[in-house]
Image: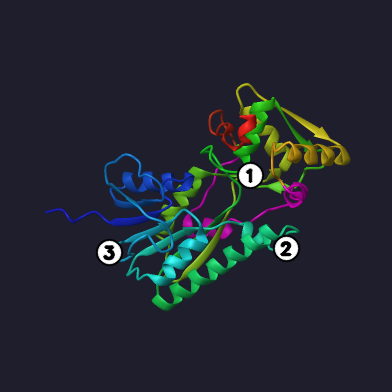
Amino acid sequence: MNPPPPRALVFGASGQIGRRVLARLQARGWHVVALCRGEPPAAASGVEWRRGALPDAAGAGDGFDAIFSCGPLDLFSLWDERHATGAARAGAFGSTSGHVKHASSEPAERELAGRLRAAEARLAAAAAARGATVTLLRPTLVYGAGSDRNLSRIAALARRHGFFLLPHDACGLRQPVHVDDLGDAALAALQRAGTDFAAYDLPGGETLPYREMVARLLQSLRPPARLLLLPGPLFGFAAVLARWLRVHDAGAAVLARMRQDLVFDASAAARDLGYAPRRFMPEAGMSGSDQYLHPSLR
């Protein structure tokens, strides 16, 4: 008689990262209990969909071999703090925004960074108290699924207008990471040695200037869109006008970061998780649609 398949609990399973984790677990023969806040997707082999919301309406955490959080880290950390998880290994996605936005000029960004850091502290404390293995994964700019709120938003605007504007000095370094590489990292976390809490930054496999990243993205569209570089004062005026017209809602801190280097070290993830992300090679069809435009402009 064959032993029962291992069981995994996946939060945020219908999101861009969650779908990748789910597919990899299915391919390896796991039985997955997948939670989503809305109407559950159609049934799939090896997947038991449940409707639930973190932190208080997501059910129990015992009886699983692995638990993955692919949604809001702060809500998962509250759930994890309140529920027994037995011997399950846990993998949770956070964000490098906790590093970047703690000193932002915008209160909402500082508040986000504070929530991320508090969530990490809760997960670390719970792991230490239980002697559990918890792996925190912090991606940089995510692309590849067409549902992120950074590169896909840029692609949607460029597709709509045929061009995209940047200041001429938008040369801050970036490391965009493909969503499939994050799915691989999540499964690798199950094999990580040790029974402790460990956190890893997950940048992409290439470091490039912001404007080159955007230019490469625009060239992947069909038809390609043009990148227009403006002098700083003229771009500032265009950004204010775009906010007034509700074309985008990027604040001053977002625009200032185009000139800042946001570079993270993947060596620890490479050593412990075998992390080997691909270079930034966007393709037509992976940058979403006009879903991020204001409704009046779709």
- Answer yes or no: is residue 101 visible: no
**Which segment is the magenta one?**
251-280
Q: Secondary structure at mark 3?
A: loop
Badge 3 vs badge 1, beta-carbon distance below 8 Å? no
Disc 2 element:
loop
Which of the 4 image quadrants contains residue 200?
Answer: bottom right
Place of residue 255 in the rendered image (x, y in percent of width and height, measured from the top left): 75, 47
Establish if 39 lies above or below 295.
below
Q: Label 1 sits on what residue type?
A: Glu
Label 3 or label 1, whichever lies nearer to me, is 3
In the rendered image, residue 278 lying in the magenta stretch gets the answer yes
Of callouts 3 and 2, which one flags the residue occurring earlier in the amino acid sequence? 3
One can see residue 114 in this view: yes
Residue in view at x 64 percent, y 56 percent = 264
* Label 2: how many Cα within 10 Å (few below 14, some 14–19, many 20+): few
Residue that badge 2 annotates = 103
- Which residue reaches farthest top? 223
Vertical position of residue 55 compared to residue 16: above or below: below
Estimate the spatial distance between the alpha carbons at disc 3 and disc 1, rounded to whole Å: 40 Å
Frontmost residue, 250 versus 219: 250
Horizontal side, residue 89 vs residue 251: left or right: left
Residue at the location (65% across, 30% down)? 297
Q: Which mark is residue 206?
A: 1
Instruction: Give the tally of numbered discs.
Output: 3
| Residue at which label 3 appears | 63
